[in-house]
Image (cartoon, grey):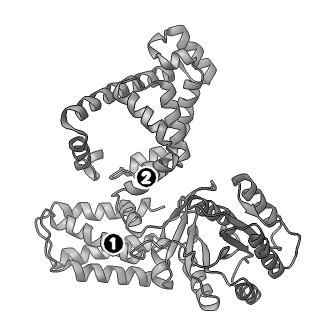
Amino acid sequence: MFEDLTARLEGIFKGLRGRGTLSEEDVRESAREIRRALLEADVHYKVAKDFVQKIETRAVGAEILKGLNPGQQVVRIVHDQLVELLGGTSSAPVLTGTPPVPVMLVGLQGSGKTTTAAKLAGWFAKQGKRAMLVPADPYRPAARDQLAKLARDAGHLVYEGTETDPIEMCERGWKEAVKQAADVAIFDTAGRLHVDDEMMEELRTIRSRVKPREVLLVVDGMIGQDSVGVAEEFRARLGFDGIILTKMDGDARGGAALSIRAVTGAPVKFMGVGEATDALEVFHPDRMASRILAMGDVLSLVEKAQATVDEEEAKQLSKKLEKAQFTLEDFRSQLKRIQKMGSLASIVGMLPGMPKDALQAVEKDGGKSLKRIEAIIGSMTPAERAKPTILNGSRRKRIARGSGTSVQDVNQLIRQFDEMQRMMKTMTKMTKRKGAKSLSKNLISRGGTGFWQ
């Protein structure tokens, strides 16, 4: 999403890092470059102007913190200002009240409301809440069927009435949510291709009938500044409590995410980061600012990993690593776990200081390498996976034929696996000799942009 903006900002900061001091003219020139970068990222021009003015005010005459050179000081100021621009703190939905707590999704047609409704139900499920999905779009063909299928596939409750009036759909869906003892009722309302009086009147009526605890505006993050105009219209004519940005894993420039909070005053609560029904993340302004400035997002990466890890399996794997008994079968299991965390590009993008060309290579690959590795390991016998040393020439030819790859691909995988095992043995020895805390501190100190140079 922010690759181009990140690259532009990196170039600006790189020119500042080698300087011993920064003059007012240096700061102003850097601020002008940052403003251009924001405008190219489709950030609202007023937002970009205010952002740069605040940076100039803070940077000119600012005390240089101990341990930071002037260039790093500017990066710190830009980071803090980005966090403020994006909302300061995360803002999850408020679920106070007698269950089922009603949550109403609104937005234009094509913004991704129906998919988002199913994703939101999945997020609530992770919080231990049972959500019922209520379709309220009788106009779009198959909208009701789409929501029902998404709900059934994910194991969520869904109201499957036959009403053709959206108001009646919501009222009966609400009653069914009460009957089913749901904790949350999510209303997937109808949209239009543009904001009009008929849609707004319908939404106002639904709001007055179901009295939602939260109204969330679903906005397509790919449409840039246009999304800000849409949000302003909804705010003026209906009002809402928060925003969900969809399609944030696409190649849009990111202007919506950087503009919408400042213009509307409403917090961005979630962002959609993929097609899967669990591809919805709480929006954390500080983490997003770190991603934009190529500082990575280790906390989100850890949370993704924790969500896919079985504690007992992790303990067993840890013992295998300590004894250097990690096999190709274990390797395949971990690859599957990585794939559950999302696209490899999104995972790599959370690593601190990842160069743009490396990230582009991962995106271009599109997960093909992981699938090739999985196919190769899948073509091995259990004995071969447990003991790769028995893989002679004829076995490797058979594996290559079975996986649709070449012998060279098989050889490369075995070499990489051997190197990984040697690295694990070395790390195990270091951990025992220096202690886990010492080793962890050493690794962290190598983080940031210098780690990948």
Residue 407: x percent and y percent? 52, 18
Going by the numbered disc 2, the residue's amino acid type is Leu
Specify the quadrant of the image occupied by residue 371.
top right
Going by the numbered disc 1, the residue's amino acid type is Ile
Q: Is residue 398 left or right of residue 25?
A: right
Q: Is residue 174 left or right of residue 225?
A: right
Residue 18: x percent and y percent? 16, 60
- For the point 49% across and 19% down, the residue is 386
Residue 230: x percent and y percent? 60, 81
Q: Is residue 385 shown to the viewer in this render? A: yes
Q: Which residue does the numbered mark 2 point to in the structure image?
A: 301
Q: Is residue 233 left or right of residue 153?
A: left
Q: Which residue does the numbered mark 1 point to in the structure image?
A: 34
Q: Is residue 44 shown to the viewer in this render? A: no
Q: Nearer the viewer, residue 56 or 263?
A: 263
Image quarter hosting the C terminus: top left
- For the point 52% across and 31% down, the residue is 332
Q: Secondary structure at mark 2?
A: helix
- Residue 30 to residue 389: above or below: below
Specify the quadrant of the image occupied by residue 199.
bottom right
Residue density around tag 1, few if under 14, some if 14–19, many if 20 or more, within 10 Å: many
- For the point 10% across and 65% down, the residue is 20
